[in-house]
Image (tube, helix red, strand yellow):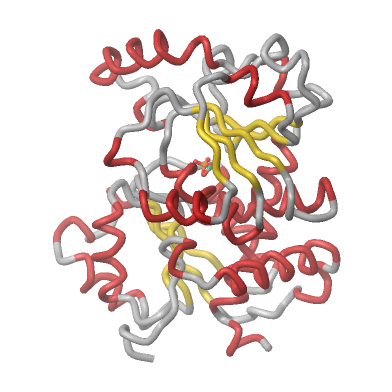
């Protein structure tokens, strides 16, 4: 297949809502009946390229390929030749050996450079703009928990980041009402088009009153206040201190949730004592580990959808 006509998953906004919903249905089936899909990608290889650190994305993609009967190759940016050449040449080569690619890149623009050479599907494993695989796992978790996504009320408290942009797209596709409590929302981080879409559907609220935002929420979601990679980086110390000062009143904790029935979501890695109090992580309210587990089946469904002509 030529690079122009292949389907990728760069952002959920590139996919029709009906296809996003069909992939969630597939994820539900794949999780319930794992044995039916075992071996469906025998002989197929996923190449995973990481410019940034990861626990869940690496493990869940690799486990997904193992369970589907295929194989995953891990490439660390620093030990490859991507830096020495044009990125599209390197992905053009990878496409000659692999059935599917996944990349975690710092910059969305670099992901688009990778895409130019990819003649097999390329999955965004998280860039500075989007985290589509995470949003699919989040919706799978809500679906499992309440039996359907439609009508769920989700409140996100934190910095407006890549996770929020993908939640905007997912909430539109699954008719989830999203309330944003984002005291820090850098304009360059916001996908205004996705925000407008959810607004037009009547599914978006914004407030800085965290207490009122959690009161009627079914789920409350938070994420790191600074990019996880820079959390302990001395050159980000000043930004970190600034954000801690601004965001501390918005920490997710039992006190904030005292009059709320909400269950707690976090995409991990967790920074206890910052965006979330440690007592919530293992509390009965927490769906965090189920949410992280769901990366596996959500991504199996994404891979199977992108390679559907090869396994159906
Ligand atoms: N949520 C998430 O993407 O986790 P990792 O950064 O560990 O892959």
| Residue 179, placed above or below residue 100 | above
* Residue at point 77%, 63% (across, down): 28
* Residue at point 49%, 71% (across, down): 15
* Residue at point 54%, 21% (across, down): 271
Q: Give coordinates of residue 299: x percent, y percent.
A: 61, 61
Name the quadrant of the N terminus: bottom left
Q: Give coordinates of residue 306: x percent, y percent.
A: 54, 77
Residue 305's image quarter? bottom right
Q: Residue 254 vs residue 178: left or right? A: right
| Nearer to the camera, 145 or 228 | 145
Q: Residue 132 vs residue 95: left or right? A: right
| Nearer to the camera, 119 or 42 | 119
Q: Give coordinates of residue 150: x percent, y percent.
A: 73, 55
Residue 119's image quarter? bottom left
Tally the numbered discs.
0
| Residue 54, placed above or below residue 13 | above
| Residue 123, placed above or below residue 196 | below
Q: Residue 103 vs residue 168: left or right? A: left
* Residue at point 29%, 77% (across, down): 93
Q: Residue 302 vs residue 115: left or right? A: right
| Nearer to the camera, 72 or 211 | 211
Q: Give coordinates of residue 297: x percent, y percent.
A: 69, 60
Name the quadrant of the C terminus: bottom right
């Amino acid at each position: 297949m030529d690079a122009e006509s292949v389907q990728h998953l760069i952002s959920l906004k590139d996919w029709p809502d009906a296809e996003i919903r069909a992939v969630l249905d597939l994820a539900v089936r794949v999780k319930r009946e794992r044995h039916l899909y075992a071996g469906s990608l025998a002989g197929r290889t996923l190449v995973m390229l990481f410019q940034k650190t990861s626990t869940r994305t690496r493990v869940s993609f690799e486990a997904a390929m193992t369970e589907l009967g295929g194989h995953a190759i891990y490439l660390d940016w620093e030990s490859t030749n991507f830096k020495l050449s044009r990125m599209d040449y390197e992905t053009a080569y990878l496409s000659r050996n692999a059935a599917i690619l996944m990349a975690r890149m710092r910059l969305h623009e670099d992901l688009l450079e990778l895409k130019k050479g990819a003649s097999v599907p390329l999955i965004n494993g998280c860039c500075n703009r989007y985290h589509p695989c995470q949003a699919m796992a989040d919706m799978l978790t809500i679906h499992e928990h309440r039996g359907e996504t439609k009508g769920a009320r989700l409140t996100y408290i934190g910095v407006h980041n890549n996770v929020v942009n993908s939640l905007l797209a997912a909430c539109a596709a699954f008719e989830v009402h999203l309330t944003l409590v984002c005291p820090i929302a850098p304009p360059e981080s916001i996908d205004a088009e996705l925000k407008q879409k959810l607004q037009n559907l009547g599914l978006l609220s914004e407030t800085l009153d965290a207490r009122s935002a959690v009161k009627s929420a079914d789920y409350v979601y938070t994420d790191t206040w600074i990019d996880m990679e820079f959390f302990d980086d001395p050159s980000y110390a000043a930004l970190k201190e600034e954000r801690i000062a601004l965001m501390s009143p918005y920490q997710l904790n039992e006190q904030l949730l005292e009059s709320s029935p909400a269950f707690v979501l976090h995409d991990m890695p967790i920074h206890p004592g910052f965006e979330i109090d440690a007592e919530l992580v293992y509390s009965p309210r927490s769906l965090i580990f189920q949410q992280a587990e769901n990366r596996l089946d959500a991504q199996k469904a994404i891979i199977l959808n992108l390679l559907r002509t090869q396994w159906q």
